[in-house]
């Protein structure tokens, strides 16, 4: 359910915060008060198109926030899949639009794309009226509604799983089923690439090792000079460090008997002398071990050039090159057994086609049976909604395909991810008129009532928790309006329902009644909304019944109507 909505600087709404309840929430108010603006703001929150013209005059940004309480596991799983956690099933959605065209969406304080928001929004709210969210305008939704009504969704999911596996097998076969010339060319090329990499005899450690050696060879003169200079300073010149230390030891040793404190100084000096002797030996040894061979430097340069050449072809480093070599080998092995693989896979595809065909026929049969029952149910509901003489139907289209492997209605068909062929809801608003596609012929008010009829039938199966009806009362009144209100209230037993209405017969059915008002303050128009108490509801229903001149009779009638419902 929608617990709360907050709107800032959207159209004529400056700052609005509303808390909603479960059941039937009704919005009333005079024409132009801003009822549809609230629905437009909610549409924006659900991923609808953002229009900078909706930003309040004089402002740079508009903000809409909503808090939803969700219990549906599939919806919560979808949220979790995009890496967002919900606390106790609560989703906080925020959308901001600015004059600069920037459009920012947030879900539980994590930024998301508009497309992601729209996917989630479609699972949260059904919005029916003169808006982009009129789901009945999209034939692909008709399949979902029919499967929901006919309880064929599980069969559809089973079919879809097998069909996807079948498609993957066909794609694999197509990749394997190349002509022999291309296969041989590919084998030859792969063999060349593998040989080229193998000939290099690469190891993951070698490149770093020879780079270090190269660096040492390039600085050979500097290293040797430093070594020789160090040896000279230590021992090879007059007054060298070792010679000086030796003299210090000679001078201190006889004085130890005189001054015992000199013993520790002597010992430390002696240790330093021995340590420096070892340093001298190490320097000399390292100097002798150095082999600054120009030919070796050339060998290293050539080897690095070879490795870099392979890197340009096969990867960013030696590890990637070796991985690529293994991939080439795997592909070569696959190609070598290509014919056998093709034969085996063709047999698997043949078996899978039989499974897919069986499931597709079962699903199509279930849909055709469900369509007949849906037609009867919808027409019955619409008749109760004062749409006498209307007809409803489901049109199935099964395009034949000579290459198809499913035999249905004496035609060869190719299945798609949704089953066999396509389907679309048909509608005839007046007696004597032929059935035509619902999306092309039905008005906004008719669409709302058709959806109300469908939702009345699908109430228990439908998992979308919030429904919004705008203009559901178009062209009706009196007892028919009361019927509409009764159906809305029935749907609201399991859904949170919002309804914008101008009819007191519908408003009187509300669990919670809101009045949308606008006023002018400081030469600026502002829209607001407030929840009505009982006495205010009575007055509002009386106003809706008799206009601005409210009589005691209209007030009494309103009291009785609210109390009875």
Image (spheres, rainbow, N blue to C red):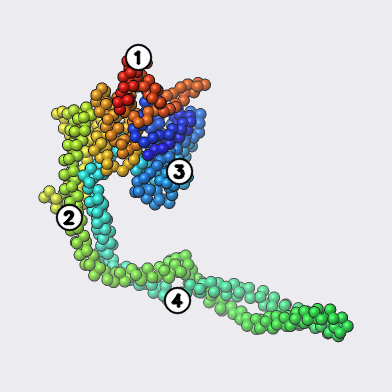
In the figure, residue 131 lies in which quadrant? top left
Q: Residue at 34% of width from left, 36% of height from top?
A: 496
The residue singled out by tag 4 in the image is: 201
Q: Name the mark nearer the viewer: 4 or 3.
A: 3
Q: Which residue is mark 3?
A: 106
Question: Which SS class for mark 4?
Answer: loop
Dividing the image into 4 quarters, which one contains the N terminus? top left
Q: Position of residue 432 (x, y in %)?
A: 14, 29
Query: What label sits on residue 358 in the rendered view?
Result: 2
- Label 1 or label 4, whichever lies nearer to me, is 1
Classify the position of the C terminus by image quarter.
top left
Residue density around tag 2, few if under 14, some if 14–19, many if 20 or more, within 10 Å: some
Q: Which disc number belongs to residue 551?
A: 1
Q: Secondary structure at mark 2?
A: helix
- In this rendering, the answer to whether 502 lies above or below 207 is above
Mark 1 or mark 4: which comes first in sequence?
A: 4
SS class, disc 3 = strand
Residue toward you, 279 or 558:
558
Instruction: Give the x, y percent position of residue 475.
Output: 26, 24
Helix, strand or loop status at disc 1: loop
The crowd level at tag 3 (other Cα within 10 Å; few <14, some 14-19, many 20+) is: some
Residue located 32% across and 15% down the image: 553
Residue 137 is left or right of residue 61, and the answer is left
């Amino acid at each position: 359910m929608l617990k709360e909505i907050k709107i800032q600087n959207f159209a004529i709404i400056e700052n609005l915060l509303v808390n909603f309840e479960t059941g039937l929430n009704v919005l009333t108010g005079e024409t132009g008060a801003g009822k549809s603006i609230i629905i437009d703001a909610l549409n924006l929150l659900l991923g609808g198109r953002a229009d900078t013209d909706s930003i309040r005059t004089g402002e740079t940004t508009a903000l809409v926030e909503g808090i939803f309480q969700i219990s549906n596991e599939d919806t919560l799983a979808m949220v979790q899949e995009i890496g967002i956690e919900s606390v106790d099933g609560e989703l906080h959605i925020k959308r901001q639009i600015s004059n600069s065209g920037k459009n920012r969406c947030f879900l539980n304080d994590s930024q998301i794309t508009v497309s992601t928001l729209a996917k989630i929004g479609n699972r949260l709210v059904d919005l029916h009226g003169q808006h982009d969210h009129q789901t009945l305008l999209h034939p692909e939704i008709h399949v979902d509604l029919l499967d929901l009504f006919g309880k064929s969704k599980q069969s559809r999911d089973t079919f879809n799983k097998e069909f996807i596996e079948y498609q993957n097998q066909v794609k694999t076969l197509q990749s394997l089923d190349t002509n022999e010339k291309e296969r041989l060319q590919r084998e030859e090329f792969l063999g060349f690439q593998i040989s080229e990499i193998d000939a290099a005899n690469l190891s993951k450690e070698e490149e770093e090792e020879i780079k270090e050696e190269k660096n040492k060879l390039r600085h050979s003169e500097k290293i040797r000079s430093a070594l020789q200079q160090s040896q000279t300073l230590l021992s090879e010149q007059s007054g060298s460090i070792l010679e000086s230390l030796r003299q210090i030891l000679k001078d201190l040793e006889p004085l130890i008997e005189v001054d015992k404190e000199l013993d520790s100084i002597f010992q430390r000096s002696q240790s330093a002398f021995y340590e420096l002797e070892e340093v001298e030996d190490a320097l000399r040894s390292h100097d002798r071990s150095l082999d600054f061979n120009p030919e070796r430097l050339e060998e290293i340069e050539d080897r690095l050039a070879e490795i870099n050449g392979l890197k340009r072809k096969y990867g960013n480093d030696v590890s990637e090159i070796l991985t690529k070599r293994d991939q080439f080998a795997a592909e070569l092995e696959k190609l070598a057994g290509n014919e056998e693989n093709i034969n085996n896979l063709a047999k698997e595809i043949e078996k899978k086609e039989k499974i897919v065909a069986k499931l597709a026929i079962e699903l199509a049969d279930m849909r055709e049976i469900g369509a007949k029952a849906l037609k009867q149910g919808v027409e019955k509901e619409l008749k109760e909604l004062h749409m006498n003489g209307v007809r409803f139907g489901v049109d199935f289209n099964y395009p034949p395909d000579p290459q198809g492997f499913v035999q249905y209605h004496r035609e060869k068909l190719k299945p798609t991810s949704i089953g066999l062929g396509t389907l679309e809801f048909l509608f005839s608003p007046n007696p004597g008129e032929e059935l035509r596609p619902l999306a092309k012929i039905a008005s906004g008010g008719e669409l709302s009532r058709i959806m109300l009829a469908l939702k009345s039938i699908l109430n228990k199966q439908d998992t979308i928790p919030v429904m919004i009806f705008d203009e559901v009362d178009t062209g009706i009144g009196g007892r028919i309006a009361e019927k509409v209100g009764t159906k809305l209230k029935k749907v609201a037993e399991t859904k949170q329902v919002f309804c914008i209405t101008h009819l007191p017969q519908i408003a009187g059915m509300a669990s919670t009644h809101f009045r949308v008002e606008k006023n002018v303050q400081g030469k600026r128009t502002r829209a607001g909304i407030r929840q009505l108490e009982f006495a205010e509801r009575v007055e509002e229903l009386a106003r809706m019944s008799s206009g601005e001149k409210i009589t005691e009779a209209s007030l009494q009638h309103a009291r009785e109507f609210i109390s009875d419902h």
